[in-house]
Each structure stands twice: as C-alpha cells, then as structure tokens.
Image (cartoon, rainbow, N blue to C red):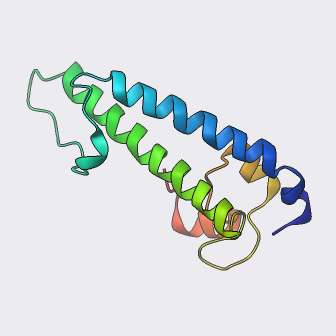
Amino acid sequence: MDADVEKYLPQLRGALLARAGRLREALRRAPGGRDRRASRAPAVAAPPGAGDATATRADDDAALAELWECEAALRRLETGCYGTCCDCRGDVGLIELLLRPQAQRCEACENRHGPSA
C-alpha cells in the first residue's frame, strides 16, 4: 500500500462507512422498503408508460451496487489489501481513493477495464 494512502486510512474508512450508511438508509426508505440484497436481479427495460417506477428501480439497483462496492472496500481494509489494484496488484493512487474510496483498480487498469460503477 502506498505510504500516502496509509496516512489517509482513517478518513477513507470513515467516508466508506458514511456512504454505506446513507445508501442503506436510502434503500430502506425506497418503495417497498424490503432488503434489496436478497434480490440481485438487475433492472429491466421499462414497458411503455412505466416511467418513474422503472427509474426508481434502476436508481435502487445503482445504489445497491455502490453499497456492495463500499462493503467490499471495507473488507479489503480489514484484510490489508485496500489500495491494491485487483488487476495488476499495483497501488491505487491516493487521489483516486479520495475521489472514490471504494475504487478497486489503479487508473491504468480502470482505463483498460472501464468504470466499475
């Protein structure tokens, strides 16, 4: 892990915990209020006239995906592999982690792979 990243670990952990909490709350307040972790089904194309309901489902799916990313990043913190690229095993840069604490790839691998969220 990059020494600069190590200095910011408490701040990054706090950001991940706060974001995960906000996402859980938003999902709990979503229409239906059920635990969406049980349903990993992606949003489907909207039938004509569905409008807001489908947009809400897509928003919920995006929030759930981001929550999973935050939880995975917290597990990486616990296991000591936070800040290590999942592809090349190089360092994920501090700026990338400050912008997106759940980032799992370095900038070069992210550019090759495409955004994970």
Q: As drawn, is 79 to the left or to the right of 117? A: right
Residue shown at 62%/34% (left/top)? 18
Q: As drawn, is 39 to the left or to the right of 65? A: left
Decide which of 94, 27 is in the foreground and name it: 27
Tell me the quarter of the picture where residue 49 sits.
Answer: top left
Decide which of 88, 16 is in the foreground and name it: 16
Residue shown at 61%/51% (left/top)? 102
List x then y, in percent, for residue 108: 68, 68
Q: Which quadrant is the N terminus positioned in?
A: bottom right
Q: Residue furthest left?
A: 48
Residue shown at 24%/21% (left/top)? 31
Decide which of 57, 22 is in the foreground and name it: 22
List x then y, in percent, for residue 35: 29, 38
Q: Residue furthest bottom?
A: 88
List x then y, in percent, for residue 42: 24, 48
Decide which of 107, 29 is in the foreground and name it: 29
Q: As drawn, is 105 to the left or to the right of 11? A: left
Residue shown at 18%/43% (left/top)? 44
- The number of numbered discs placed on residues in the rendered structure image is 0
> Vertical placement of 62 versus 95: above or below?
above
> Vertical placement of 17 versus 68: above or below?
above
> Vertical placement of 11 versus 79: above or below?
above
> Vertical placement of 116 versus 28: above or below?
below
Q: As drawn, is 36 to the left or to the right of 112? A: left
Tell me the quarter of the picture where residue 15 sits.
Answer: top right
